[in-house]
């Protein structure tokens, strides 16, 4: 275990009105009382200020703006101890339909942030994805580790990989005080209805059949977003500068198994769904080996009962229709245009 701890008093959280970033903001407010959070968020279709509504105004400030706005970013970074960077275009299907905002936000946005952090000597944590490693075969005993070569498949994952490489280069060349984490698939409340689990749950609430891509056997390694947040805090405060840590909770499941679990929760027969057009370049399997994070920093996930976490998430979508309803129609129209 490291014997030095970084204790930030002020942090900037980019993308703090999105799914995972807002969970992190709640986590910090709840678990770390001395810390002030400035959220920088552009409020794209995926950002919703309601995600952080009700948090104490002396602890959390929302700045609506773009991470590509160098002047704004410079000012905010000059006033903070650390930046935790979640803001991104995050959805693979959207990146196939139009890659351009992914390049702008994920690559140029990261560049803008790390330039400001190097100017002001701020600590920087970069939130990334296991998708930078490409995919594994279903029968491959291997899992991703920090040593796995980068081999991204989609426009989304290639822009995330690009941003990771910028951070590595800035750490080595300019001494940027950076860490990187690559996490597996998150689930939980406040996830946009374009993503797999919320899409199927809200379809079923609407009496619409769920939609499964390909043969349904693609494997994702699920982690509750609360466990992702505790891992990011752990790396921010105790991780070694310049290091990458993989985050995962041993949650491998194929899509059809997850879908059948959701159908069961709605009392629907297990084949009550539609097969739809597969995603081009669809990654087969993701699997994380989080040994480094567990051994070196002593982190452990707590929300490892997937069935319980899924039931709670379904309940949240049933109870919070006003939150997801405004995005549902446009999302489904987009999918329909793509034959999905
Ligand atoms: P999300 O799409 O729910 O939220 C993204 C947030 O970023 C939104 O609030 C949006 O308004 C904001 N944003 C987008 N472009 C911006 C810009 N140019 N300037 C400022 N703000 C901007 O995403 P998410 O699922 O919460 O993912 C958050 C981060 O975690 C991303 O970096 C993603 O790559 C990473 N990640 C996600 C998963 C997952 O399962 N969803 C897994 C591993 C890593
Ligand atoms: O309707 C659907 N039907 C379906 O079968 C949708 C929306 C998805 N799928 C499949 C595709 C994937 O195999 O479900 C799986 C999960 O899909 P997504 O929710 O789109 O997630 P994924 O592409 O795995 O990427 C997610 O995890 C890694 C996040 O969106 C990324 O931001 C993160 O980096």
Image (tube, helix red, strand yellow):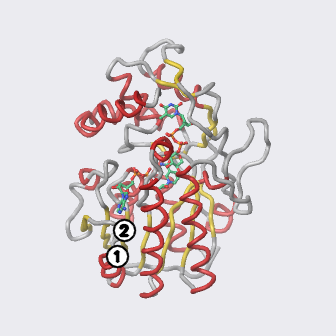
Q: Quadrant of the N terminus?
A: bottom right
Q: CA distance from mark 1 to mark 2?
A: 6 Å
The residue shown at (21%, 55%) is: 54
Q: Where is residue 337 drawn, in percent x and y?
A: 40, 30
Question: As displayed, is residue 95 above or below residue 105?
Answer: above
Question: As displayed, is residue 40 above or below residue 132?
Answer: below
Which residue is label 2 attached to?
67
The residue shown at (54%, 81%) is: 177
Which residue is label 1 attached to?
73
Q: Residues within 10 Å of mark 2 (few under 14, many from 20)?
A: many
Residue sitting nearer the eye, 58 or 38: 38
Q: Is residue 253 left or right of residue 312?
A: right
Q: Residues within 10 Å of mark 1 (few under 14, many from 20)?
A: many
Residue 189's disc number: none
Chain-order first, disc 1 or disc 2: 2
Tag 1 and tag 2, C-beta contact below 8 Å: yes
Q: Where is residue 334 drawn, in percent x and y?
A: 38, 34
Question: As displayed, is residue 323 above or below residue 112?
Answer: above
Question: Can you tell me whether the CB of the residue at mark 2 lies under 8 Å from the nearest atom of ligand 1?
Answer: yes
The residue shown at (44%, 55%) is: 100
Residue sitting nearer the eye, 12 or 32: 12
Q: Is residue 100 left or right of residue 183?
A: left
Q: Where is residue 320 drawn, in percent x and y?
A: 27, 36
Q: Secondary structure under badge 1?
A: helix
The quadrant holding residue 325 is top left
Q: Secondary structure under badge 2?
A: loop
């Amino acid at each position: 275990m490291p014997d030095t701890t970084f204790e930030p008093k002020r942090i900037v959280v980019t993308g703090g009105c999105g799914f995972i970033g807002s969970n992190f903001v709640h986590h910090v407010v709840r678990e770390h009382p001395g810390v002030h959070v400035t959220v920088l968020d552009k409020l794209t279709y995926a950002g919703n200020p309601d995600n952080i509504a009700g948090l104490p105004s002396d602890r959390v400030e929302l700045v609506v703006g773009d991470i590509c706005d160098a002047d704004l970013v410079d000012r905010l970074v000059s006033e903070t101890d650390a930046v935790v960077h979640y803001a991104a275009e995050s959805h693979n299907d959207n990146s196939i339909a139009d890659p351009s905002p992914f390049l702008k936000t994920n690559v140029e946005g990261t560049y803008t942030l790390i330039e400001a952090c190097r100017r002001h000597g701020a600590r920087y944590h970069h939130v990334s994805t296991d998708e930078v490693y490409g995919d594994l075969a279903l029968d491959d005993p291997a899992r991703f580790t920090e040593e796995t070569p980068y081999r991204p498949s989609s426009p989304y994952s290639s822009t995330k990989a690009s941003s990771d490489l910028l951070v590595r280069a800035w750490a080595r060349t300019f001494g940027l005080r950076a860490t990187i984490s690559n996490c597996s698939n998150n689930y939980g409340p406040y996830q946009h209805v374009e993503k797999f689990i919320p899409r199927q749950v809200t379809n079923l609430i609407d009496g619409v059949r769920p939609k499964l891509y390909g043969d349904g056997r693609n494997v994702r390694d699920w982690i509750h977003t609360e466990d992702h947040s505790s891992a990011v805090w752990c790396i921010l405060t105790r991780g070694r500068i310049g290091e990458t840590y993989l985050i995962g909770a041993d949650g491998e499941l194929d899509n059809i198994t997850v879908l059948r679990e959701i159908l069961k929760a709605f009392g629907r027969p297990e084949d009550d769904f539609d097969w739809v057009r597969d995603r081009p370049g669809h990654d087969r399997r993701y699997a994380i080996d989080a040994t480094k994070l567990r051994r070196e920093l002593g982190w452990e996930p707590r929300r490892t009962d997937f069935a319980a976490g899924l039931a709670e998430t379904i309940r949240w979508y049933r109870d919070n229709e006003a939150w997801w309803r405004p995005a549902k129609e446009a999302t489904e129209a987009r999918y329909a245009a793509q034959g999905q």
